[in-house]
């Protein structure tokens, strides 16, 4: 049984999120578990503006997605704190994250006996573009 950790802001749920969660659940395997970290508002604001939806709304949305087995709060933008506590076998990362952050996560995962799997980021499927489209229409 594989334990997979993946994390999101999840301000606007879109196809890119669902693809990543579906792929993350597939990495966990039939008997595995996908744990999803939802960034708190404070964690998001370390690098981005305050989310439109509250943390509780984003948490509830993640909990309703069929690929997700468990949702936890992520108190920092970096997943390091959560992966040290959860000790997953696999950390899913987005290629949109800074290389130095991914390298740091890889070191932590290696120390835990796990690995990092990097999933491509699809810039045409993102919350920012959706928000802009809504604003302009």
Image: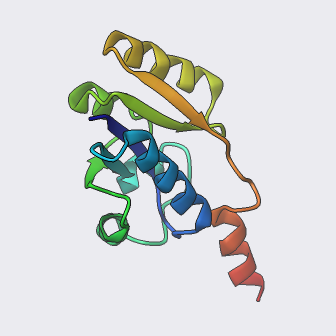
Choose top left, top right, bottom left or bottom right for residue 136: bottom right
Q: Nearer the viewer, residue 48 or 37?
A: 37
Q: Quadrant of residue 29?
A: top left
Does 64 sit above or below residue 2? below
**Quadrant of the snapshot with the C terminus:** bottom right
Residue 56 placement (x, y as % from top left): 29, 68
Is residue 28 toward the left or the right of residue 47 in the image? left
In the rendered image, which quarter contains the N terminus? Answer: top left
Q: Position of residue 125 (x, y in %)?
A: 70, 62
Left of 116 or right of it: where is 89? Answer: left
Residue at 43% across, 32% down = 91
Position above or below: 53 against 44: below
In the image, 41 versus 20, the foreground residue is 20
Q: Position of residue 53 (x, y in %)?
A: 43, 72
Q: Residue at x 57, y 68 (%)?
A: 14
Of 23 and 84, the residue lying toward us: 23
Q: Is residue 9 left or right of residue 88?
A: right
Q: Position of residue 109 (x, y in %)?
A: 39, 19
The reply to whether residue 74 is visible in this rendering is: no
Q: How many marks?
A: 0
- Residue 5, can we see it? yes
């Amino acid at each position: 049984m594989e334990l997979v950790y993946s994390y999101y802001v999840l301000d606007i749920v879109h196809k890119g999120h669902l693809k990543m969660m579906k792929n993350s659940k597939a990495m966990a395997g039939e008997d595995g578990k996908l744990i999803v970290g939802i960034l708190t508002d404070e964690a998001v604001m370390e690098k981005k503006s305050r989310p439109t939806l509250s943390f509780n709304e984003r948490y509830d949305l993640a909990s309703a997605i069929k690929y997700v087995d468990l949702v936890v709060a992520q108190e920092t933008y970096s997943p390091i704190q959560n992966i040290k506590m959860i000790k997953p076998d696999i950390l899913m990362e987005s290629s949109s994250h800074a290389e130095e952050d991914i390298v740091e996560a890889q070191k932590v995962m290696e120390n835990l006996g796990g690995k990092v799997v990097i999933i491509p980021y699809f810039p045409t499927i993102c919350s920012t573009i959706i928000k802009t489209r809504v604003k302009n229409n």
